[in-house]
Image (cartoon, coloured by chain):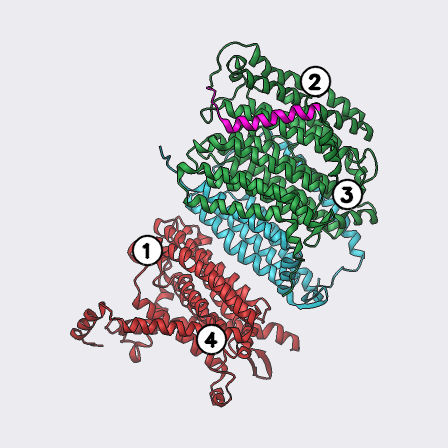
Amino acid sequence: MALPFPLSDLLVILPELILSELALGILLWAAVVKRERERALAWASLASLAIAAALLPVAASFAGELPRSAFGGMIALDGFSLFFKALTLLAAAVTILFSLRFVGTSPYPGGEYYALLLLTTVGMMFMASGTHLVSIYVALELMALSQYVLAGYFKQETKSVEAAAKYFVLGAFSSGVLLYGLSLVYGATGTLSLGGVSAALEAAPRSTLLMVGVVLVACGMLFKVASAPFHVWAPDVYEGAPTPVSAFFAVGPKLAAYAIFARIFFDGFGPRSDDWAPVLAASAALTMVVGNVGALMQTNVKRLLGYSSIGHAGYALLGLLAYRAGGAAGQPEAFGLWAILFYLTAYLLMTFGAFGLVVLLEAKGYATESVDDFNGLWKRNPLAAGAMVVFLLSLAGIPPTAGFVGKYLLFSAALKAGWPALVVLGVLMSAVSLFYYFRIVRAMYLVDGEGEVRWREEPAVAVAVGLCFAGTLAFGVLPQPLIALAKSCLLP
Amino acid sequence: MEPGLFFFWLFSAVVVVGAVGVVVMRQPIHSALFLLLSFLGVACLYVQARAELVAAVQVLVYAGGVMVLFLYTIMLVNVKRQRTERYLHRQAVPALGFGFLFLLVVGGVVVNEARALAGKAPAADPAALATTVIGSETVLGNTQAVGWVLYRDYLLPFEIASLFLLVAMIGAVVLGKRTMERFD
Amino acid sequence: MSESLVHNVLVPFVKGLLTVILVATAAGILTWIERRGLGRLQIRKGPNRVGPAGFFQWIADVVKLVFKEDVVPSRAEKVIHLLGPLLLFMPAVVVLGLVPWGPELTLFGVTTPLHAAADVNVALLLILAVSSIGVYGIILAGWSSNSKYPLLGGLRSAAQLISYEVPMGFAVVAAVLMAGSLSMVEIIEAQKEAGVWFVFPGLVAFFLYFVSGVAETNRTPFDLPEAESELVGGFHTEYSGFRWAIFFMSEYGNMISIGAVATTLFFGGWLRPFPNVAWLSFLDVVPAFFWFAGKVFLFLLVYIWFRATFPRYRFDQLMALGWKALIPISLGNLFLVALAALWGAAGLKVLGAVLVLLVAAGLVAAWRRPARASVTTRMAAEKVEVRA
């Protein structure tokens, strides 16, 4: 019997395959494991992620010459996807470390939590390498659905349920918009593979049908990366979801969404970039303003970080705009893209770091999360306070941190690509962001008094935060290796 | 008017009336029934497009499965007739405005495109769809054709979709079942 | 009259009308058979006053039901209340129209295949689709009555029908795998070509189909939606007169269509036994339609036998049986049948032989083992003599 695809195609998706099987295994194991031994499931999940990560180079080497297309052009393995897959695996691993105590002390089962986390990671990995609108969409939904469940996982917390409901309704709506756009694109070009769409765009004259489709796809994608004017769900969801989950939401899905954003718009709609770039530019400008100004008024740390992540989505959009700043495709000078890769890595490290400290602060599940809880943290735990300062500096983009280097690369790419006004706005907004980041710093160092919240030692989280801390500083001081790596991982 | 066109307009009207009914009805069960009507209309349109398999699956899955569960849920939680509340608050005006604008743009574009297409010959003769040539082989009927496309060309998305459904099931169980007692 | 008008309008209309009439009449006669049969099985007489052996009882009942007052609860949803019985009756008829009753028939110079609707190439799927609509009849009838017990009955049936559609679908898929087609005619032809009725390789599938079919038609032992001791009349408590009669007819209509589909899928439809064995060709004297009807009739007798034999399941048992037993079995069976079908006709025969041997062995083992209950049964049987 003939297989519909060469057997070696399975090797291309080996990490995803193994990871989903391990996730199912964990799910089955969870059915029999004793409640007090559930922590073993977490370690097993971590091990699964490590195995998947170890399989990435294996898959790459078996795939032969990159980029390697598989399953009839449904997905492709290339440097770009490998980079994003590694990042999402890292994000999931950090989230598991954050979740250990959170889930362990909650009345909710752990097995399904970890299995869903792994499955959402599988979805993100497929997203990173999807080269066909159908496979991208299905993978996106796999990711999103797991996340709706994770957001509402602590189902007796009203806030958690509210967050899940909001996330679900808006997410489903944005998926609808995205799908409608994709269907119009299909109607205009007659194909759903990105290469086909691109070829059709180059051949065909400009069609309004296609443009409406592209704009709708852009709207859907902006929803997914929480960019203005489709950002409203983000702070509410980050506030309501269990903190480790919010940390994950602020990083993982965004990474994957950026991956498909870049791929759809450059591999697919690339030939029409002049038409859609203004739309993205407008959204980028709006996002930077809304995110940073919105954050000024927040007293809840999770909301504050939520708004700040909206602002960062705006900066990253700037990078998308500057994709082809430095030269033609396939050359390392394609400046904007590797700037995004670097920036997103830095974003992962610093956002996880900041959220990790919030996780440590929350001893009683849903304890208050207001900025005042950081009061006098410096006296109680100088190490943590110092780390927080570094993360906040990095988020604001102050040297010598990875955030600074990332922003610098992004802005210079945007300048080269000819968006000076946006760069000026970006710098201005970074200045604005200092205000609200330093409200936390001020609380930690200048305000006296014990916060309401008990500090809880949690080695797993501490290790994760420590790693983020080290990464943030290291890539700030020595960005070269990461830049080289990012450069080698560009879209073809 | 030729009969084919007549039935097309008829079924389309059923679909649209069903869709409007879903939104307009105050009694949730009536809404669900109008949705059912809409689904059946879509199935009829599929039949007209010679996609019998898709039509049958549409009825089987949406009308026979999904909507029954909707009804089941509505009856189980005993959703009452909605009171006459004021729905038109401040958001309504801009929402209506944007909705109308969107309809205008998309509708205009689609109509425009359809006009442009009307002059051209159809891409595929519906009658020819009964036999499909895929690769080097000719397959009969659209069951085989759909199977071929689904399990050959779209195998990977199909499998991802199965994973997706699994997640939906896990999620439903996790969110639906009673919380576990702590082992303290 | 033009040729196309005859073929496209008149003939289908006549055939459709015939199907409706046939279902209605058969349902009536079946009630008589059922009541007499139950009487025999329960050692009593059953209806015996109207006509020979009470045969005209069903006509008397119909007359009564038609002229009975048609009560509609005052706070019922009128339109939906009316829709309920129709939605349940319609699928039964449509399904029967999709099943071929025989090969072609020439009458008054018009040649037409012997089934009411066309031989759609996805007929089987369409049958599943249409019969899945039937549940609306029950659930809407239950809800629209605006009364407690009917609502409970409707909810129960929705859960039950949805659950049992799954193993039923898988059983059907097994038959499709063996035939390689979704067209009912082609499935029958495939059984002729394979030289074996699909009931043998599909023994498990047939069992699953039949059990799910009993559940789908709300017959004992799965008649929970209308469980009298728990829910009064279940979903049709608030129905009376002719509307109630339609419910009644739909139940029998559904039984007939389940039997017809089972006959087609597993018992070679209109084919005579051993259609490939030449020396049995004298059996062809009996027209194809009667082979088909005879097989369906046997199914109906089994239904009645079931009703007299099995006690009703509890609702949770019903669900457990569906989800925990039938669905896993159906999946395993699908795997087995797929393997056999991959091997070809020989594989089907081998699988059939193995299954039949297994069942025979099981029966022998059960017969050899002294059953504890049999003693008391015999004692009871000796005491009571049949007075019918």
Range of magenta residues? A454-477
Q: Are marks 3 and 4 in contact (CB under 8 Å)?
A: no
Residue C236, horizontal then vertical, whole percent: 37, 57
SS category of the residue bearing label 3: loop
Whether callout 3 and callout 4 share a subunit is answered no
Q: Which chain is red?
A: C
Residue A192, horizontal then vertical, whole percent: 71, 50
Q: Which residue is mark 3?
A: A492
Q: Which residue is mark 2?
A: A431
Q: Residues within 10 Å of mark 2 (few under 14, many from 20)?
A: some
What colour denotes chain A? green
Q: Residues within 10 Å of mark 1 (few under 14, many from 20)?
A: few
Q: Are marks 4 and 1 in contact (CB under 8 Å)?
A: no
> Could you tell me if residue A309 is visible in this image?
yes
Q: Identify residue type, mark 4.
A: Phe
Q: Identify residue type, mark 2.
A: Ala
Q: Which residue is mark 4?
A: C267
Q: Is residue A455 magenta?
A: yes
Between tags 3 and 4, which lies in front?
Answer: 3
Q: Which residue is mark 1?
A: C314
Whether callout 3 and callout 1 share a subunit is answered no
Alpha carbon of mark 2 to alpha carbon of mark 4: how far?
81 Å
At 49% across and 80% down in the image, what residue appears?
C289
